[in-house]
Image (tube, rainbow, N blue to C red):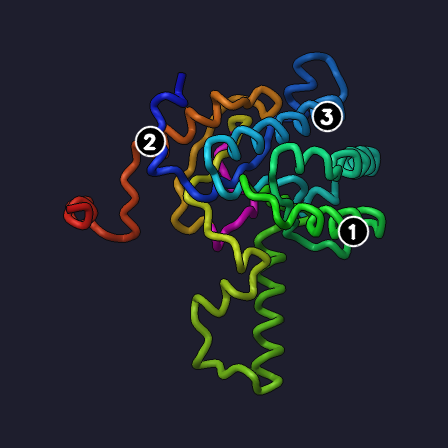
Amino acid sequence: MYEEQIDKSRLPRHIAIIMDGNGRWAKAQGRERTYGHQAGAQTAQDVVKAAGRLGIEYVTLYTFSTENWNRPAAEVQALMSLLMQNLVDKLFMEYDARFRVIGDRSRLTPEIQEAIVRLEETTKNNKKTCMVMALSYSSKWELTKATKDIAREVADGTLRPEDITEQTVAQHLDTADIPDPELMIRTGGEERISNFLLWQCAYSEFYFTKTFWPDFNEEELCRAICEYQQRQRRFGKTGEQVEDDKK
């Protein structure tokens, strides 16, 4: 069991996950893509529950990208319907998990927007973990929005260009109050980050697995954490400097 190998004193605070492979998983079973998305939704619940039990503070799931709006209308509608089915208080209260959404909410239906606000409010005092749903999200959208907001403050005279720092940019992102992910997991065999948390993942450790998302489970999560803990996180320093800092 990989869980037995985890050093609980060195857990990542934040794990970001690109949940890839639902459609291919369904196709391999001779089923429609929507069947894979339904199975993937259950996996998401199981992984968030496992993360809370392990002590992971934040889990961000790449649920629906801005580019996904270009998928066939029937698939988009099915995904939105599935989303509504899972915006349920009971699930998050049972896991003692908070709920957050990052992304362009304006493109979502009023019904979904209202459900998101309600769920964020009702779960805000839960303690175990926070499930962050990247919904109608892309890093290019987020960085463009942040740039516009900063430019507006400069034009208003409330911010001087010379005072703009990396922290200024970070504070204008949707994730302003969320720590950067130490570990980014992508399932399904692809090895790219697909416009996901580009700023925030600048120093994340990447873990790629061929396992399709519906087959990803608690053991797979623990395996990824074990792999993360075997890596030396240097942040631009030499390995020797990192070891000296530990002394």
Please name the residue that numbered disc 1 is placed on: 113
Residue 229, percent across and down? 33, 34
Secondary structure under tag 3 reads helix
Badge 3: how crowded within 10 Å, few (<14), some, or many (20+)?
some
Q: Is residue 166 above or below residue 154?
A: above
Which tag, 1 or 3, sits closer to the chain's start? 3
Q: Determine the residue positioned at 64% across, 20% down.
A: 25
Q: Which residues are magenta?
A: 190-200
Q: Determine the residue positioned at 36% across, 33% down.
A: 8
Q: Is residue 72 visible?
A: no
Q: Is residue 1 magenta?
A: no
Residue 214, percent across and down? 62, 22
Secondary structure under tag 2 reads loop
The disc placed on residue 38 is: 3
Please name the residue that numbered disc 2 is placed on: 7
Which corner quadrant of the image does residue 212 belong to?
A: top right
Q: Is residue 38 above or below residue 246?
A: above
The Cα atoms of the two marked residues, 2 and 3, are separated by: 33 Å
The Cα atoms of the two marked residues, 1 and 2, are separated by: 39 Å
